[in-house]
Image (cartoon, coloured by chain):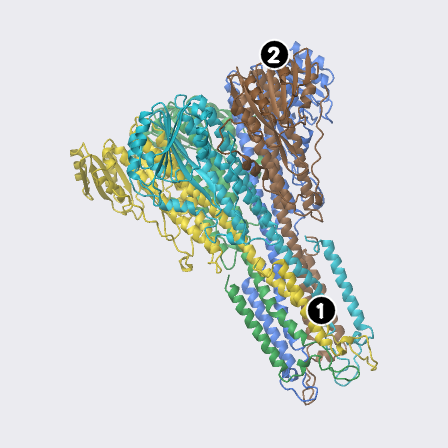
Chain colours: A green, B blue, C brown, D yellow, E cyan
Amino acid sequence: MTPTRLSPKPSPSLDPQSTPSDGFITDREATRQAREQQVGQRPGTLNVHEGALPPRLFLTSYDDTTCFEEEFTGRYDELLEYMRTHPKLKHWVDVRGYNDLPLLERMMQDFGLHPLQMEDVLNDYQRAKMEVFDEHRLFMVSRMTDFTSNLEIDDDQLSIFTGPNYVLSFQDDYDDCLDSLRVRIRSNFSTLRRHPSLYLAYALTDVVLDHYYPTMAAIGDYIERLEEAIFAEKRPKRLLNRILRIKKDVVRFRRLVYPERDKIAEILRLPEEVMPETLKIFYRDAYDHAIQALDLAESYRDNISSLTDLYLSDQGNRMNEVMKVLTMISTIFIPLSFVVGLYGMNFQRHDDQGHLLPHNMPELYQPWGYPVVIGVMVLVVIGQFVYFYRKGWLTNR
Amino acid sequence: MTPTRLSPKPSPSLDPQSTPSDGFITDREATRQAREQQVGQRPGTLNVHEGALPPRLFLTSYDDTTCFEEEFTGRYDELLEYMRTHPKLKHWVDVRGYNDLPLLERMMQDFGLHPLQMEDVLNDYQRAKMEVFDEHRLFMVSRMTDFTSNLEIDDDQLSIFTGPNYVLSFQDDYDDCLDSLRVRIRSNFSTLRRHPSLYLAYALTDVVLDHYYPTMAAIGDYIERLEEAIFAEKRPKRLLNRILRIKKDVVRFRRLVYPERDKIAEILRLPEEVMPETLKIFYRDAYDHAIQALDLAESYRDNISSLTDLYLSDQGNRMNEVMKVLTMISTIFIPLSFVVGLYGMNFQRHDDQGHLLPHNMPELYQPWGYPVVIGVMVLVVIGQFVYFYRKGWLTNR
Amino acid sequence: MTPTRLSPKPSPSLDPQSTPSDGFITDREATRQAREQQVGQRPGTLNVHEGALPPRLFLTSYDDTTCFEEEFTGRYDELLEYMRTHPKLKHWVDVRGYNDLPLLERMMQDFGLHPLQMEDVLNDYQRAKMEVFDEHRLFMVSRMTDFTSNLEIDDDQLSIFTGPNYVLSFQDDYDDCLDSLRVRIRSNFSTLRRHPSLYLAYALTDVVLDHYYPTMAAIGDYIERLEEAIFAEKRPKRLLNRILRIKKDVVRFRRLVYPERDKIAEILRLPEEVMPETLKIFYRDAYDHAIQALDLAESYRDNISSLTDLYLSDQGNRMNEVMKVLTMISTIFIPLSFVVGLYGMNFQRHDDQGHLLPHNMPELYQPWGYPVVIGVMVLVVIGQFVYFYRKGWLTNR
Amino acid sequence: MTPTRLSPKPSPSLDPQSTPSDGFITDREATRQAREQQVGQRPGTLNVHEGALPPRLFLTSYDDTTCFEEEFTGRYDELLEYMRTHPKLKHWVDVRGYNDLPLLERMMQDFGLHPLQMEDVLNDYQRAKMEVFDEHRLFMVSRMTDFTSNLEIDDDQLSIFTGPNYVLSFQDDYDDCLDSLRVRIRSNFSTLRRHPSLYLAYALTDVVLDHYYPTMAAIGDYIERLEEAIFAEKRPKRLLNRILRIKKDVVRFRRLVYPERDKIAEILRLPEEVMPETLKIFYRDAYDHAIQALDLAESYRDNISSLTDLYLSDQGNRMNEVMKVLTMISTIFIPLSFVVGLYGMNFQRHDDQGHLLPHNMPELYQPWGYPVVIGVMVLVVIGQFVYFYRKGWLTNR
Amino acid sequence: MTPTRLSPKPSPSLDPQSTPSDGFITDREATRQAREQQVGQRPGTLNVHEGALPPRLFLTSYDDTTCFEEEFTGRYDELLEYMRTHPKLKHWVDVRGYNDLPLLERMMQDFGLHPLQMEDVLNDYQRAKMEVFDEHRLFMVSRMTDFTSNLEIDDDQLSIFTGPNYVLSFQDDYDDCLDSLRVRIRSNFSTLRRHPSLYLAYALTDVVLDHYYPTMAAIGDYIERLEEAIFAEKRPKRLLNRILRIKKDVVRFRRLVYPERDKIAEILRLPEEVMPETLKIFYRDAYDHAIQALDLAESYRDNISSLTDLYLSDQGNRMNEVMKVLTMISTIFIPLSFVVGLYGMNFQRHDDQGHLLPHNMPELYQPWGYPVVIGVMVLVVIGQFVYFYRKGWLTNR
């Protein structure tokens, strides 16, 4: 099997017109979630949120030697029947879309799921978590991330239930980001097919973790572009906004991934009978991945804070430049203006009686008075330029 | 049962006249609490604070099949009698208002409550907490939050005592924020009626937690409005004050909710005989809710700190704009003023003896002197505009 | 017993002349303590610090039915005799003032106190702590706080030793802040008199905790006054100093109270035989009090940091205002000055030979030249005012 | 054996032309790593990254009395054979370069390595970690650091597997930074040769730790140079960038070394049968080394943050200097210009009818009018200089 | 025994010429340590660093009744002999100076010290730590601090080994800061002589802790002086540098003392057979001392950060002052200059043909024109002064 490398996401451009005019820095997604919380409702009540998709059902059944894939959308009974008649196979039931409450309630009964867990599946804002139920079965919630062209972290929920020989996965999205897994199952020589069904649950979690890297890489690319923009001759508008917006995204990413890491740590602490050591070695690998993703996020946070410092210092430098121009112009011309004003005074050469007043501005009556004044002013300007040059004001800082 | 969604609170407007003139940033509520603490008093002394309401008594009695609701205000004995004659029912005694010390002391005796606990009920500034007493009974304090139109977090206390077949709840407020629960009890098919009375205590806690979301949503809305205000042409007055005031509220919210989370975590650690596993699964759900509310608060704190950065940077930018205007005006006109001053000098064309002084300002005697000077000045101005344009000073940053 | 509410301390005024000229921000008290530490001395050596008061001895003996109070200053033997002859009573020996080393050494022997503990009593800068000695006895150090009119946190030490039927308390201060306790003991119906002597030790600790609230309330009042001062037309001098000084006080308060909280937590972990469960319930209450005091301190720290932000932003705004005035004046008058300078030029109407030079400043020879120039200048000024108004520079920000 | 001191690395110069024009502050290395992560691939799949070197094999076999060294590149079978025929010797197999998948897969089988571990070896961005496998064997990953002339922390991975009488080490680099170890093995009297093969694994870890110090020393040198640059007359360009870039490096260093410290702490917690106490004493020493390296990094972080403060304050000071120059020039000349303008007014001495107007500017007709005005202006200037001197504006602050 | 109070160190003055011109803020000591680390060397190799002193040997032997002190420099065999012939006495062997490798190696063998421990003794940059070896013996490293006149924290290492009836102490310094201990041993009634030799090890640690206070007091004094300097009329140069330098020192102090505290905490956790409870009570006292020293350091850090805030705000205020002067001068004189410029215009009273142009500047021909203009200007200036006064610009802020 050749490794499929996810092509790194193109991160959003810094093109001025792509600037979203609102929703910039504050975490409006979080506020929206808070606003949509149901208040005073019986816990365990199932609510399908508006805009949910009608569910599609996919079954993948396999063992060491066989592999069967089919879409059972609208044929839930047939799906159950197939599972019942093939008890030796491992089954992966993939439900995409929640918009069919009766179906979900039937599944709850058929697969013995707790109403609170099903509520968590439908509540699309659940933190990543893990619960053991019925002593041996696991319920896991993961959050998949994506960095949109709108500079937002988009996150979808993947809920997983394990059973003796099956795994149920729920997501409210038709995009098959689990496709890479399907490809691996189809392969004849896949280790996945030799492991118990619990391994499939691990593999699903692993796919989620794998998606953190392209998200981070896209954010990282964008941060690099922001850095270049700070020193560009023409700074894009609202640059600080963008920096702070990306900071918000990184913070949001951390908030999404920390629970994921904690979830895996909890799985590693499960007793042998629930999670055998042979599988834990894989979760330990996943744990390392989660830590590395968080490391990256920490690193970006530091970078963004450095960018903010740079931005503000650059703002100060620009003010400094403006002040220098003002000061140079003023320093050169204000004294000159004084000199020319001086010889614009009207002290009279004769008083009202016509007597000569020889002390009143005799310079004005010298044959070379004007050229000398002009010369003196030129010398003053030259002196000032030397002074500015020594101060380093003429060079660009 | 249809889910009742709490309509999101309208958050306070940014209208200039709504600005409270005092009490802005500092946590005056906290200071008031500190000032009202009793010093040197015997622990366990009951004090009804000024302004407490006269108590109203509500009884809700139910089991799987029956449901009885009645107000027993002023008829405490009848209430007791009813409870005694219906030992099979689960009873919820809801006391609203504390202003009747003898009644409270009778209840302490009749229901076996500890004086220190009753003091905690009456002291309206108690952190959320949980205590086990009499080996199997629970005493819980919760804090309900509200975001007022005055940009304050308002918080009320809900105290709960559990007993073998009853739950006592105390609050000093006639507004029935527990009404959603009452509706659920009335419903014939409510799971609530099938669970033991301890579940009612859980349901009360859950209602408190549910109220955190509209509070946060209102704060979030306000933060978004603040963000928009920063970039408005006409910034509202004292914008930073408002930003910092909201920060104070978020910090206060966290201080209220952290103990709530810890309380639930403590409940989850209670032994099986005090809190059975079948109920713990609900508290685990409540724990998730508390964490999510805290996550939101963290998120808002980050947002507010970004807003503060933006505000200060924008303040710098505005200063920069002012400086640029000054510099441009000065740079354009000061040199020109020098030129016109130059030709305003009075160097004389003839000395006292009437000899011609040909080197004194011959320009003034040229037929085209004036137009040439005007032309030179126009060219200088054009040159300066080109320079400013290149510097990007003419465009809006 | 009527509850005695401590009248809230009047906090120091913001009156300019009350500003202490030195010792402002830095924690000089801490430095003084460091300077006074003895170096290289045998641990357990008793040193009475300079300025200690001569000791006064007070005995309060009580049981359920009797209560005896007397001052035994200078009559230590009689005090011992009284205690020996009344073994059934619980005794509270209150020592105020340390300046009598031989007496203290006798007490060490008579009551079996460890030299290191006695050293801690005399060393007035001991952190709050708790030690068990002789298997069942407790040694506790508490710190009482006060907010002085000099904007300082004043703290005094209260040391307590417990014995089978007595409690020793040491403090170097004649002010009886323990008076409220004495009043409670005198009361016939005091629960205090029914509890064992260990409860008295608790009650002493509780009085210390109670004093934290007026301290905090005074600080909170002062912070509110500082907030108002920031926006006052006439800001008091050195306002930032005062803000930072209060910050220092709050930090100092936290440093004093954290060990107190830890001490109580340690007491709660003591085994049943040292600290019975019936008393622990009271310490749990005290623990809640300590946490609330720390919560307050955290809250104030946040407030002060907001105040600092506001102050600095306001400083920036004031600079901005100054710049705007400068810019408006310059923008209005510099161009006008150019215009009047222009028409002050001396380009001549006739050359040396008396030929008319019709292109030299013909405006000056127009009948309406002057009024037109004046009119143009008025229009320019009006235009500039419109521009400034649009920019919002004329309104107060 | 003489101790070989690593010559301290010359740290990069501050020469302006060495400034890298891009990749400045943000952690582009981290982004590159994120971008290169494989998504959706079966865990345990071996991928040799592009640019990997063809492997070279080195064998060092020794015991107390003999020592054998040879390169077996391309002769893996002979190496195995040699190891098989010398079971009493301890063998160190050093593999440099990964670009031979079949060889690595053979080694996996021959030495019983887990695919996930081999994947970690090949994935060059693994955090330092330690795993026990096959009950007694250790797998360790270390990261070696280097401070490049490009102001980057370069880090390479060293992976170690231990076996009963051998140690495998993997690195993708021909530079032999392990040479100092080889020299020690060759020595007849080396304690290394007397210890079991596990000690060799320790020695390899220790070499990695030793390399942290020159890295830090080079960074420290650079920081000192940056500090000097801040106060240089001619500040190098983009100084803040460089400061923030070094901050990034220090943060990156910490991120690399923290896991190393945790790894060693984990080794110290291994049970006696896996890691005997006689070896743990050495790891305890290594632990101290790791802590000291982290201490250094913390220290540098504080220093860099101080440098940033200094830089920004210095930026403010420079602005202040500019403003002072402007203010002094303006304050001196603007009033003077007013005075000379005053006497440039054209108030006429006679009205249109030729009547004398004696109140119109009589100064102009005084014999000493001009010298007096000049004198007054000189006095004003002297007064202003005295004022500036008192303000301290003339001295360089 | 009279307590010897260490005279508080005179802290370095703020005299301008005492400013060290380099090595200011960055922790060059740390970099030097990093640079001197040996790389790739066998652990446990003894290296005497350059500049080490030749060792001097001091023996102090004592029990309850006798006390013997002698310098055995160069007579190590005699020292051993004396110890062997007096097995009942407790011996304190004090080694000062390391520059004699053979002697140290003999001591290692004679007293059974581990090479790694001896390496730690010689490596002068060891963090404070504690190790148990040979089951009952302790190896302890302490760091003594000093605040030099060069504004540096100087730290020396004191290494201690305990044995059944002896204590070895090593330091590379002839200054006897342990002298106070020696004085105590000589005293006939010293408790020290009655305790086992382990108590001497405690007493040595205690002396180290005692030295932290004068160090901190000197730093505190310096901080107070810095605070005063901020508001001095003539601020010393590079004040922020000094503030940040002291910050570095405080941070360094914390880094030195934290391990000391941890070391003592570890000693407190030692089992009874290694460290009896009767001694632990003294270590508990030492632990309190370490905590208090750290508390002080935290307090200073807060103070320094307040000083930095003050400094920067004061910098802003000074800029503000400069701007106000500029603005006042400009606001007063620029309009006046316009007025005088206005009446300097040359609009002619007659056109070329000699016709009267009555609208051209008739003011100039009024008999009271000049005095009226002067009067108007005086009124304008008065108005402006009133405005400035109201704005509070005339008062010193």
Q: Position of residue B126 (x, y in %)?
A: 63, 26
Closest to the camera, between mark 1 and mark 2, is 2
The disc placed on residue E338 is 1
Q: Which residue is mark 2?
A: C84
The kind of residue tagged 1 is: Phe
Residue C285: quarter of image: top right
Q: Determine the chain carrying the residue at label 2.
A: C
Residue C139 is situated, as x and y percent measured from the top left of the image, at: 55, 22
In the displayed structure, C116 sits above or below E314; it is above
- Percent from the top left, x then y, of residue E35? 37, 46
Asked which secondary structure carries label 2, the reply is helix
Image mark for residue B5:
none
Determine whether label 1 and label 2 are within 8 Å by CB. Answer: no
Residue drawn at x 41%, y 21% as measured from the top left:
E272
**x, y percent for residue A11:** 46, 49
Q: Is residue D127 visible?
A: yes
Q: Is residue B63 visible?
A: no
| Kind of residue sitting beneath label 2 | Arg
Image: B61 above or below B254: above
Q: Chain of mark 1?
A: E
Q: Nearer the viewer, residue B94 or C139?
A: C139
> In screen coordinates, is D47 left or right of C58?
left
Density class for disc 1 (Cα within 10 Å; few <14, some 14-19, many ≥20) is: many
The quarter in which the N terminus of chain D is drawn is top left
